[in-house]
Image: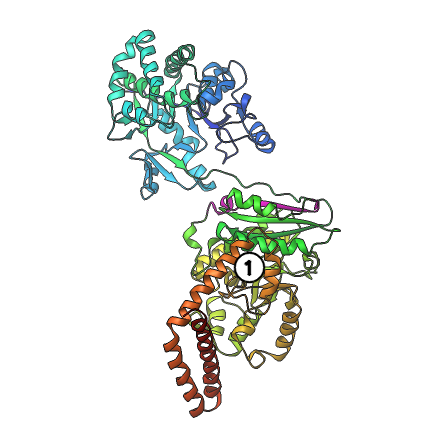
Amino acid sequence: MKSAEHLSEKDIKILVSYHKPAVLLKNEILTPIHAGRAVAQKPSKDGTIDSTSYKWLQDTMIGDDTGDNISEKNRFYNEVTSIYWAWKNRKALDNPKYVGFMHYRRQFIFDDSKQNQYVNNPWFAPQSEYKIYCLFDKDLSVLFSEDQIIKAVDEADVLIAKPVEYNISVYEQYANDKREHVLSDLECVLDVIDEKFPEYSESAKEYMNSHKHYFWNMFVMRWNIFDDYCKFLFGIFFEMEKRIDISDRNIIKQRIYAYLAERVTGIYITQLKKKENISIKEKYSLFEEYTDIPQEIQPSFKQNNVPVIFSSDNNYVPYLAVAIKSLIYNSSPEKNYDIFVIDEHITENNKQLLKQLIPDNAENIRITFIDVTPYLKEITRSVFYCYGYFSISTYCRFFVPRMLKNFGKAVYLDCDIAIHNDIAELYQCSLDGYAVGAVPDVEVLRCIENDVLIGNQNAKDYLRNTLHMQNPKDYFQAGVLILDIPKLLQQNFTTKCIEKLKEIKKPVYVDQCILNAVIDGHYKKLDFKWNVMWQIPYYIKDLNCQIDIKIYEKYMAAYNAPYIIHYASSIKPWKNHDIKLAEIWWQYARQTVYYEQFILNLSALLNMQSMKLVFEYRKNCFKYYRYKLLSKITFGKKRKKYREKKKQYRQKIKSARLIMKKYI
């Protein structure tokens, strides 16, 4: 058993291996190290690191390229180059009594009691390593405080990650994974052990036949044990380098020493367990799926910059392309257009196609993609209520102030729009001291005036009692917004939106309702022409009778001369090409690479609709005659309603007869 001793932070150094920017794990004990710094700017399996990332690594942590080092071998050794550096540069670490290793995405759970909070997580490796989405800031102090690390280390001579238990042996597992491993490499390890370290031969055989696999090159060891381990590990590897030529292998199979180090560690631990008076403790570990940190977004242009931000997932990219093309078509050479796309898993191919929308000679337009994932780190995705055609990307506008914190103002736009005027004119609109500029929502105003339901509630009741708006008539449409970034940051806007969403849970118009609940009418009302909701006249034939006449006149003036057409609701121009204002969307769609896809999709949809009309011909005839009769025997509003229904079914019958005459 290990004798009790009083350790301090200075007695323990646990190196955390990095090869790219990620959440920084750093305190008096945890010591980030850039593994492979000597070759960091050369291509690797992850590509080539950019200059900004490289500088972050240089500024934030030590490298493994000083003193006695093998940093230039990192492409073959991976994190093992940092193990070698620690072995040969103990003084640079202030001569610790214990040395350990973790990774930027793999960490020990030092306090066994903390395991309980992960028991419902999926396993990354059976009975050994939990999978988590990411570490939150609050986790750093909970999981990695110096006190609990000291307590864990004080209980043992060696801490090691719990082994993974498979139904095949260590040897079989290595042999079966032919994508990454060459079995002769492992055979070479065993040969070198027999020749150079024969005292380990029996443990090597025992471990190779074991079903417990010690992966990940994670451990904490008393220095004298660590020194012995490194003599064994690198004694094997440096001999292997003389015997094996890996120059003609692919980049994955060249990483042999990182893979083999895991097996050599298992052999060493197997041997160590046979010694008396050495305490070995096994600890659960965590594997993070996402480790990136938010990129620092700066304006692309120093003067006349017009920041515009969209949000899209991969499915909506074709419609985003139309919106961006319409923006570019109406841009001015005197302005600079800084276009940002909040990226919810957009493929690299689609990103390139979007960038190709910019004309070759247009030096005043830039498209930048912003990965939304880092901004969602501390938020459970189930919080984001979605239904129908809504996706999580619609909630991304909550995070715009944090993303564009280095900007003064920005325009946010939905993807289902066509811009028919220079967007710089909208950007230049004064907010008169408000944090947000928006257009009042005509459809919601209509619902209020006519006691129409929103969801399952009366419109006024929903807006007052669920959203808690003081004046429901101040509800705005959120597809086009001007945002004062500093004001929104000062108001803690993002946090308020998330908290309000947790409170309301299932907002009818998803993020738009949340924005209205938070802003509660305190916004600059913009001209209706900047966000013309195209579907309203299509749905509502007597709109002039259902809303305030002044609002109606302003809306119709905008509808007849729109600056931005918002193709809101389930009615879309790519599905309903014959509705007024659809032609404007198609005008810009023709200029995108997705045009043929739109045509094919529309053709298929029209064929389906035609077949439906034919199949429902008799049923529609019955309904037509029914409403024809009702329109004659009723009066007032009912007669008007039934006449409208009669017209709809007469048109369906007419269309079906034309199809049958042509094709049947």
> Is residue 490 among what the camera can see?
no
Choose between 118 and 317: the one closer to the eye. 317
Task: List the residue tagged with mark 1.
Answer: 416
142 relative to 316 in the view: left or right? left
Choose between 431 and 545: the one closer to the eye. 545
Q: Is residue 254 above or below residue 537?
A: above
Residue 113 image point, x, y percent: 32, 37
Residue 626 image point, x, y percent: 39, 85
Residue 337 image point, x, y percent: 68, 50
Occupied quadrant, residue 233: top left
Q: Is residue 118 above or below residue 431?
A: above
In the image, which residues are magenta?
A: 361-378
Quarter of the C terminus within the rendering: bottom left
Residue 315 image point, x, y percent: 48, 52
Q: Residue at x 49, y 61 (%)?
A: 603
Residue kind at label 1, given as amino acid type: Asp
